[in-house]
Image (tube, helix red, strand yellow):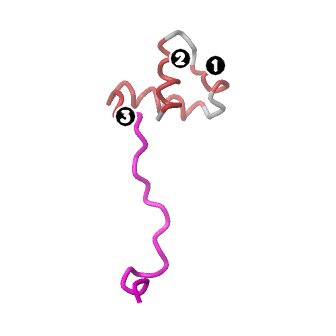
Amino acid sequence: MRRRAQAVLAHHRGFCIDQLVVLFATHRNVVSRWLGRWQRWGLAGLAEGARSGRPPKLAETVKKK
């Protein structure tokens, strides 16, 4: 979340999206998404969301045995 907040602050201070892309070594779409989430949800929008990830191969009941 820190990088996202820094990008939003830099944008507020006058950095354009292309400059933020270089500064944060990320894609233009990513920076645009960060700024959009900030506009819609504020600080909560910059928080890391839950990711589903890969499901476990073994069921919990099998692991316990």
Residue 58 position within the rendered picture, expressed as x and y whole percent measured from the top left: 46, 81
Q: Which residue is mark 2?
A: 10
Mark 1 Cα-neighbour bin, 10 Å: few <14, some 14–19, many ≥20:
some
Query: Splitting the image into 4 quarters, where does residue 39 fall?
Result: top left
Quadrant of the drawing holding the C terminus: bottom left
**7 shown above or below 47:** above
Q: Please state which amino acid type lies under the numbered disc 2.
A: Ala
4 vs 39, left or right, is right
Report the Cα–Cα distance between label 3 and label 1: 22 Å
**48 shown above or below 64:** above
Mark 3 Cα-neighbour bin, 10 Å: few <14, some 14–19, many ≥20:
some
Report the Cα–Cα distance between label 2 and label 3: 17 Å
**SS state under label 3:** helix
Mark 2 Cα-neighbour bin, 10 Å: few <14, some 14–19, many ≥20:
some
Residue 28 position within the rendered picture, expressed as x and y whole percent measured from the top left: 59, 30
Q: Residue at x 36, y 29 (%)?
A: 43
Give the number of callouts.
3
Q: Is residue 10 magenta?
A: no
Q: Which residue is mark 3?
A: 45
* Dominant SS in magenta: loop
Verify CB contact (< 8 Å) between mark 2 and mark 1: yes
Q: Which residue is mark 1?
A: 19
Verify CB contact (< 8 Å) between mark 3 and mark 1: no
Q: Is residue 63 magenta?
A: yes
Q: Provide the residue span drawn in magenta.
A: 46-65
